Image: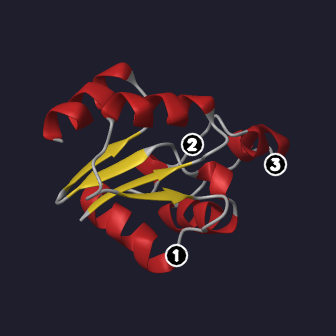
Amino acid sequence: MKKIYHLASCSTCVRIIKELDPDSNYELQDIKSNKITEEQIEEMHALSNSYEDIFSRKAMKYRAMNLGEKDLSEAGYRQLILDEYTFLKRPVIIINDQIFIGNSKKNVELAKAAM
């Protein structure tokens, strides 16, 4: 499987996708218009071994909901991501059995090399 979960309105995601220049074998999923399914989040978890790793603390709702003051479990992270697309750390790039999470320069370079 070759897939990129992103937010179409996010300029960082747009820039990274342009930089990666994925071919037609890659499926692009805008997580705002096409919500993440339970099956998809389970696949991400199987590759990353952690819901926390795919959870974004930079989301505005993280502060608004005072989540920094709560002790979240793996199940809690999972449910928040399923309930609200903004909690997925973006982009998430899946290339066969590898997962690249987030927009750090190192992560983008690793994904580019894997492509």
Q: Which residue is denoted by mark 1 in the rendering?
A: 37
Tag in front: 1 or 2: 1
- CA–CA distance between discs 3 and 2? 13 Å
Asked where in the image residue 9 lies, by quadrant, the reply is: top right
Q: Which residue is denoted by mark 3 in the rendering?
A: 65
* Quadrant (top left, top right, bottom left, bottom right) of the N terminus: bottom left
The amino acid type found where label 2 is placed reads: Ser
Judged from this view, the residue extending furthest toward the top is 105
**Residue 86 seen from this side:** yes
In the rendered image, the vertical position of residue 23 relative to residue 46, given as above or below = above
Image coordinates for residue 38, horizontal then vertical, percent: 49, 78
**Residue 71 seen from this side:** no
Q: Is residue 5 left or right of residue 59?
A: left
Tag in front: 1 or 3: 1
Image coordinates for residue 72, horizontal then vertical, percent: 60, 55
Q: Which residue is denoted by mark 2 in the rendering?
A: 56
The amino acid type found where label 1 is placed reads: Thr
| Circle nearer the N terminus (1, 3) | 1
Q: Which colour scheme is used?
A: secondary structure
Judged from this view, the residue extending furthest toward the front is 24
- Label 3–label 2 contact, CB within 8 A: no
- Secondary structure at badge 1 equals loop
